[in-house]
Image (cartoon, rainbow, N blue to C red):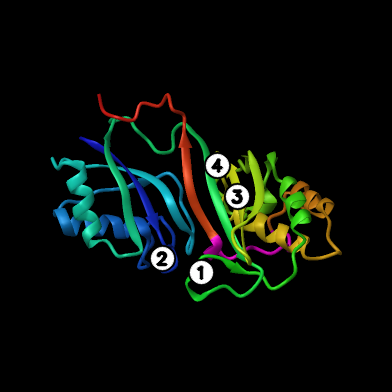
């Protein structure tokens, strides 16, 4: 059965995450329901990342199979016409029958946006208004605590499947977006649920207080205790920006 790859952007504010939920709206459920509405055909979509409730995306990667024989550009246009304005299929292409968006991921790029002064209304839903003064140089040092390969159990939900909580962060830094807005850019091949939000919350907390240092974050990381009391940043500031794959992976169907 023909397989297609899609790249999806969405505002996650009004959804309970990417993954299908019982009696709650999700991104994948909306995509599947609208596809059936448009084409009178059911599909099952596999996404590369299970973004949480309230998290946004510019470059979520997914795939699905369908027996429909429709030009990809026409399929994409018809689908987008009925999807809500909060979801858009940015690209759609035919791929190899063996393609899987989980395979050969090199790096996922996430941005976390925060504001040090009250943001404009149309920006507020995409970032955290952080009310405390932040030492940006200290924030950068805090982020470096998490770069590398570590056991991130202390910065997970504690209910992750299996016992493998070892992950690698390849880079993490903060940059200014405008007069009052900043973004933290974190990259790595794979993340635990809530991992980025817990890291961001902990780093901003430490960077805004004289009583906490990078050594406190190192201790929390080493303790492997998910019930540590450092704060969890809210979902609204987190965006899945891009997923990079090994370029040797065969994408298009021969």
Q: Which residue is mark 3?
A: 185
Query: In this orientation, which residue lies closer to the viewer: 51 or 111?
Result: 111
Q: What residue do we see at 55% from left, 42% from top?
A: 190
Mark 4 or mark 2: name the one nearer the start of the chain.
2
Residue 182, quarter of picture:
bottom right
- Foreground mark, 1 or 4, reads 1
Q: Which residue is mark 1?
A: 123
Q: Which residue is mark 2?
A: 15
Main secondary structure found in the magenta portion: loop
The numbered mark, 3 or 2, whose residue comes first in the sequence reads 2
Q: Are marks 1 and 4 in contact (CB under 8 Å)?
A: no
Magenta-colored span: 227-237
Residue at 43 percent of width and 44 percent of height: 48
Q: Nearer the viewer, mark 3 or mark 1?
A: 1
Q: Identify the mark nearer the N-term, 3 or 1.
A: 1
Q: Nearer the viewer, mark 1 or mark 2?
A: 1
Q: Secondary structure at mark 3?
A: strand
Task: State the residue position of label 4.
Answer: 190
State the residue in front, 29 or 188.
188
Per the model, the C-alpha gap separating discs 3 and 4 is 14 Å
For the point 71% across and 50% down, the residue is: 143
Residue 58 location, x and y as percent? 43, 52
């Amino acid at each position: 059965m023909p397989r297609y790859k899609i790249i999806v952007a969405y505002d996650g504010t009004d959804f309970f995450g990417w993954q299908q939920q019982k009696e709650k709206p999700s991104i994948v459920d909306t995509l599947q329901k609208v596809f059936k509405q448009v084409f009178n055909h059911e599909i099952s979509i596999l996404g590369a990342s299970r973004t949480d409730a309230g998290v946004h995306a510019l470059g979520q990667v997914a795939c699905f199979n369908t027996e429909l024989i429709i030009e990809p550009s026409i399929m994409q246009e018809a689908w987008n016409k009925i999807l809500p304005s909060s979801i858009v299929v940015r690209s759609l292409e035919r791929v190899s029958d063996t393609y899987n968006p989980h395979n050969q991921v090199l790096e996922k790029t996430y941005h976390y946006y925060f504001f040090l002064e009250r943001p404009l209304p149309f920006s507020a839903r995409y970032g955290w208004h952080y009310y405390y003064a932040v030492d940006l140089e200290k924030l950068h040092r805090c982020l470096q605590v998490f770069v590398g390969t570590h056991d991130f159990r202390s910065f997970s939900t504690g209910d992750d499947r299996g016992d493998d909580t070892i992950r690698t962060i390849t880079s993490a830094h903060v940059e200014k977006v405008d007069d009052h807005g900043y973004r933290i850019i974190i990259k790595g091949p794979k993340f635990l649920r809530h991992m980025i939000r817990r890291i961001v919350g902990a780093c901003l907390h430490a960077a805004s207080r004289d009583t906490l240092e990078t050594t406190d974050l190192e201790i929390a990381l080493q303790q492997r205790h998910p019930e540590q009391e450092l704060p969890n940043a809210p979902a609204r500031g987190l965006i899945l920006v891009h997923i990079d794959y090994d370029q040797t992976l065969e994408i298009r169907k021969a």
